[in-house]
Amino acid sequence: WTSHAVLDVEPDDTYWCAADIGWITGHSYIVYGPLALGTTSVMYEGTPDYPEKDRLWELVENYGVDIFYTAPTAIRAFMKWGQDYPKEHDLSSLRLLGTVGEPINPRAWKWYYTHIGGEECPIVDTWWQTETGGMMITTLPGIGEMKPGSAGPPLPGIDARIVDSGGEEVEAGDAGYLTVDNPWPGMLRTLYNNDERFLEEYWREYSDPDADEWVYFPEDGAKIDSDGYITILGRVDDVINVSGHRLGTMEIESAIVGTEGVAEAAVVGGDHDLKGEAVYAYVIVEDDYEGSDDLRERIVEGVEEAIGPIARPEEVIFTPELPKTRSGKIMRRLLEDLASGDELGDTSTLRNPDVVDDIAAQVGDD
């Protein structure tokens, strides 16, 4: 249903979900949804920059892809490489774009809308999890108004709410914790051979078992506006405690990526003698820019203006890449180890393990 209603997949479409098939998005939206609807799917094994950085747009043009679904991580890489690569190809077959995997900041959203969709394709910014099985929060194309950076309202039948620490719904404009208060199709039932951990991990925070009231807590922070649109702020455990102030990493990263010349950023907390924990930012610049002192100053000013001086990065480290898993997730744990000078943990799941040594050398230079 979500493949049909959100991605607008029809049997005569040529649809491409450019995700790793081993990731849940690959299961649900490369295999199950498109096959159930009888559509033609593009499947491609390889990287988006080989043999050239226009590889994806070459395939879109060659096969007449009309629906394209990818992750903000990939979009930020496209931004870094520049608009000339998609400009070399006819992308007029596209009629709908989607994002999945993490919140997308407004600047990346607008780049995607302008340079890939030609300002004509609706974008569906979908929030969901491996544990939910399918999409939960997103606009419906042609029905819901798009708001860059905001996923949208819950899908029909999904009882998603934003609550405070006491479980009460917050006012419009306020931030809180995302919860789901009623069952949904595709929901997880347990963890393999571990019912107790299943309850502890997902249900204990806001549920009242004695009253038979169960509330699912995905451990994401979010805010809601007066239209009922939900903006995902990131994992509640992705928090840096600076001098007693709890700062969300996604909010700081969004402020950094809003700086002209920045393609991608990862923010972590590192040990600090006075503050206890400080903000360390790892930044990838767009291809036409260099990691200069001027850009570093503009990044710091942007964070202070958007959030406040308390969020000022202690260090801004420029790097050509970030350590990522095959599905495109940034391994912030390794960046935390680097910031604190700790011994690095397991790097076996990285698709680019060499980048850790490069970043370590850059940290040493800075």
Image (cartoon, helix red, strand yellow):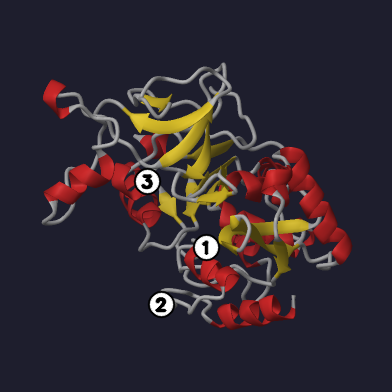
Task: Give neighbour class at mark 2: few <14, some 14-19, many 20+ (Cα, 10 Å).
Answer: few
In the image, 203 versus 68, the foreground residue is 203
User: Which secondary structure, mark 1?
Assistant: loop
Quarter of the picture holding the N terminus = top left
Q: Quadrant of residue 290?
A: bottom right
Q: Amino acid at mark 2?
A: Asp
Q: Is residue 39 left or right of residue 171?
A: left
Q: Amino acid at mark 1?
A: Ile
Q: Nearer the viewer, mark 3 or mark 1?
A: 1
Q: Nearer the viewer, mark 2 or mark 1?
A: 2
In this view, 364 is above or below 197: below
- Label number found at residue 330: 1
Please report whichever mark, 2 or 1, sits nearer to the chain's N-terminal start. Answer: 1
Q: Position of residue 355 (x, y in %)?
A: 59, 78
Q: Which residue is mark 3?
A: 129
State how far apart marks 3 and 2 are (Cα). 24 Å
User: Which secondary structure, mark 3?
Assistant: loop
Q: Residue at x 69, y 72 (%)?
A: 320
Task: Give neighbour class at mark 3: few <14, some 14-19, many 20+ (Cα, 10 Å).
Answer: some
Q: Residue at x 17, y 43 (%)?
A: 189
Q: Nearer the viewer, mark 3 or mark 2?
A: 2
User: Which secondary structure, mark 2?
Assistant: loop
- Label number found at residue 346: 2
| Residue 141 visible in image | yes
